Image (cartoon, rainbow, N blue to C red):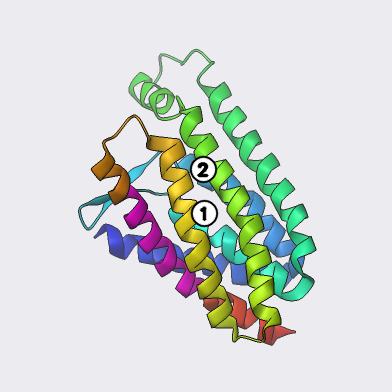
Amino acid sequence: MNLAILFIEVILVYLAILLLYKFFKKEGLYIFAVLGSFISTILLYKTIDILSYESVLSISINTSLFIIANMLVQKNGPDEIKKLIYIILISSVFAYIMLCFTSLFTSSEYNLGVNNAYDDLFSLDIRLFLANLISMLLMIIFNSRLYHMLRRIKNKIWISNILSLMITSFIESIIFVILGYIGSVNLVNILNLIIVRYVLKIFISIIGTIDIYIENKSN
């Protein structure tokens, strides 16, 4: 069931990207980057089971930001990524700070159960946040340059996108899991988390290739 719901979520995410690009062009991609950074910061703290293996729920949004990076590189070159990096960094840090602030307020006695659940949910682990942010930003920079290099070789779009993200996603998965979980879970679980994250990111990246094709054909 979770896999099916995740698939629907991925479709909705890429549909949102296409709609924003259709109406706002490049600026629409930056709008999604802001929204995606906020949503990813929240969903990062919910863990789901996919075929009996654990994954953080933010993985679809996280991967979609890599697709946006490739869409920007496709039309504007790798230098455009610097702006995207700043947007993701500022949006993610602002989202984290605002969510942390919510736990500082004294909850109302009205609907106390919901308020306590909210406070528990957003007692955020900065280690996981930093693991996500560092691995994502480093690999978006690396991926944009790799994708640009592959496109200059005149590969087809789907080859460049999938090949660049196959390499990048593997490294990103290792960095994220090691920074976020090493020392708190055993080695077997570390390996499982890396493998599951990597496989899911490749699956999501393949679907995201459709957005890059449509963007390329629209201009």
Give the left or right position of residue 208, taking residue 140 as reference: left
Secondary structure under tag 2 reads helix
Looking at the rendered structure, the number of numbered marks drawn on it comes to 2
Screen quadrant of the N terminus = bottom left
Which quadrant holds residue 8? bottom left
Residue in the foreground of this view, choosing between 31 and 136: 136
Residue 197 is covered by the magenta coloring: yes
Query: In the rendered structure, which segment of residues is drawn in magenta?
Result: 193-208
Residue 19 in view here: no
- On residue 163, the disc is none
- On residue 132, the disc is 2
Secondary structure under tag 1 reads helix
- The residue lying at 46 percent from left, 15 percent from top is 108
For the residues bearing labels 1 and 2, Cβ distance under 8 angstroms: yes
Circle 2: is it few (<14), some (14-19), or many (20+) Cα within 10 Å?
many
- The residue lying at 59 percent from left, 47 percent from top is 37
The majority secondary structure of the magenta stretch comes to: helix
Give the left or right position of residue 182, taking residue 72 as reference: left
The correct choice, above or below, for 190 with respect to 60 in the image is above
- On residue 62, the disc is 1
Q: Position of residue 194 (x, y in %)?
A: 36, 51
Q: Nearer the viewer, mark 1 or mark 2?
A: 2
Give the left or right position of residue 57, taking residue 158 as reference: left
